[in-house]
Image: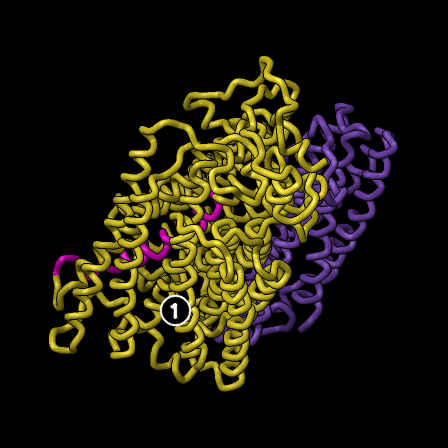
Amino acid sequence: MSDHAHAVHLETSTGLDNRKLAIWTFIGSECLFFATLISNYLVHKQTWLSGPGPFPHEAWTSPSGQAFEPIIEIPLVTMGTALLLFSSLFVVLALANAQRGNRNGLLVWLAATLFCGFFFVGMQVYEFTHFVHRGLTLKTNLFGASFFTLTGFHGTHVTLGVVWLLTLWIEAWRGKLTPAKSLNLEIAALYWHFVDVVWIVIFPVVYLIK
Amino acid sequence: MATTALDQHGAHATAGHAEPTGLWSWLTTVDHKRIGILYGATAFFFFLLGGIEAILLRIQLGSPNNTFLSPETYNQLFTMHGTTMIFLAIMPLSAMFFNFLIPLMIGARDVAFPRLNAFSYWVFLLGGLFLNSSFLFGAAPDQGWYGYANLTSRQYSPGMNVDFWTLGLQILGVASLAAAVNFFVTILNMRAPGMKLMRMPMFVWMSFITQVLLLLAFPVITVALILLMFDRFFGTHFFVPSGGGDPLLWQHLFWIFGHPEVYILILPAFGIISEVLPVFSRKPLFGYAAMVFSGAFIAFLGFGVWSHHMFTTGMGPIADTFFSLTTMLIAVPTGVKVFNWMGTIWGGSIQYRVPMYFALGFIAMFIIGGLSGVMHASPPADLQQNDTYFIVAHFHYVLFGGSIFGLTAGAYYWWPKMFGRMLDETLGKVHFWLMLIGFNLTFFPMHILGLNGMPRRVYTYPEGLGFEALNQVETVGSLILGFSFVVFLYNIFKTARGPRNAPADPWDGATLEWAIPSPPQEWNFAEIPTVHGRDALWEAKRERGGPLPEPPRVSGAGIHLPNPSIWPLVAAVGLGGLMVGLMTAHIVGPWGIVAGVSILFFGVYNWAFEPAG
């Protein structure tokens, strides 16, 4: 979303386009953002295990005698994870088509990326709703607080990525995402890959490690 | 050759760009020099505000059992004084120099992202106004600039005070991060031909390291503030012990940000005086490479010392030892810098001009602050000194004696370049001596008071503890210190009425900004210079065998400039609206938030789709 369409491409000192360097810089900064959120989750793990449930991985009975199943649905989230990973491949194919000027290929692969993105966000909406129905909210315990904060901010990043890629899909559909402007997609794709990579860390930390 | 580009007689005067004027031209400006001036003016206003807050605090402490301020007001004023000076004065005053100087020093026409630059400024302005608007509701933040849990919990701070602080700092963080990405890319990517990294002026190097610190430290405080916001707005328990949370987690997160932050505050001043000292000693900077690497080493170590702010929390001997050693280790690269500055002056033909006065004052005052810093790097000593006025003395010697002396040196040094007018030398020297005397009278006695056990953050003290006399001296000192800035204001006012006749190169400078007219034209360089070594302008003058001719003001016909844009301001207003929406959500529901986000998206989309020119 930064300065588009430099009419004159000036030589840069590093040879790397300004916008590309900027997105890499931003990603570097974002690493610290997610590192802090993930640390926050891990730091609280000891505490929330002794607090009130429900817990993510094990069956649990509340003091009032109410029984809880393990709350996390690993198959569903695995599906979302897999699609998110595939979407990284799809966006690379979309970019290759954009650079070659193949509008149809670009539209198809970008749509596939978007489908995966939408599925992931939808999965998260379902998961959050499901958790709330099972009695887990931000306020319930520190697991709820750190889980919703961590995955929620990741989900917000995915959502912004979907909005960004959707904007580019409309541009492509109107024939404005020409090979000369394919850098616009490349930058969005770098962001998209980053959001994927973060999930590759979050998925095992939250869902697979007990 | 080197001279052809710096000596700009080749360009011819025909009809070209006219300098835009009027309010609209300032609201839509993307010119780094104008944005720099906006940053400077706004930050100086906040600096005066923070100064007035400090003087009110000193009046209250001038005598024992004083009732000039209520305890509640005192808490609000010391919190806002710290928050204002750090986030609204020193950081943006440094940003003024980043904006104005970096493109000029590396030989560029603008920053990499001119509109993002404007966005940073507008977000900073709105964040500052948002934070200070708390005074209108009588609910200024009152928990200290460090915001320790659980002073910040809903239970102990039910009012809006902490909300203003949390959301205000969040906005200011966005401004800092946007600017940091911009300058990081600008310095790496926009250098003139031949301006290799190890030829960059030291100010650019220190600015570059500061941007890296901003990029890595601000995300941490962003998350900490998000967690605090969730605790306060949505009932989570991250820092609330009754819900299993840990108040010390806040301290860790805050100081992982907070310690790099002190280097964010001081490194730009290091850069400024590394430019001033060589020019007024008529010698190149001593130990250039050592200066670069010591700066980088300070920044690196800056991320490994945060817990020295927490020795009194009982972390145990291993953590205490580790953080004590890393903290003492920082004295090494800092000492390298101090000795290099002295090596620069050594044997030079020193010219005692006003910028040099402040630069020399910086070295002396910063050494005192540095030494007291090494003292409480030792946990046993810190256990005595923590939470006393000794600490207050220490950080004012580094932040005022360091950062503000350095920034003031920079203000006098670059004033002719920014405004085309030379500030008055005599008034400048009066400013310096009043500031030096007032500063030491205010802060030196705090060392003694602190060691004698006077606690900080208390609104008064009883009679008979032996605190009276020194506190009185401090209060008188603070008034002198405040008055020194009245002299500075008068100097600015007097100069503004005088002629605009500063030459391009009044100090026989070493860096590229002195090769172009004062003030520079909109496009900075009519022809992009080619650089052949460090101290590029001295190099060019040596090659020519004398001073360069005064560069003519030329027409910029054919020079490509970025278009002005209103969208950065619109996007910033959206972000500000989002924060106001969060503050008022309990009254008007989600509509304020929705409006803010909509304006933000509207601004960003128009920004993304308008031609940048």
Give the side of residue B479 with respect to residue A40, left or right: left
| Rendered residue at 38%/63% (across/down) | B365
Q: Residue furthest bottom?
A: B317
Q: Residue at label 1?
A: B368
Quadrant position of the N terminus of chain B in the picture: top right
Q: Colour of chain A?
A: purple
Q: Is residue B241 above or below residue B489?
A: below
- Residue B70 at x, y percent in the picture: 17, 59
Q: Residue furthest top?
A: B15
**Secondary element at tag 1:** helix
Q: Colour of chain B?
A: yellow
- Residue A35 at x, y percent in the picture: 61, 62
Viewer can see residue B86:
no
Amino acid type shown at disc 1:
Ile
Specify the principal SS of the magenta part: helix
Between A71 and B153, the one lying in front of the other is B153
- Residue A57 at x, y percent in the picture: 65, 70
* Bounds of the magenta segment: B67-96
Viewer can see residue B338:
yes
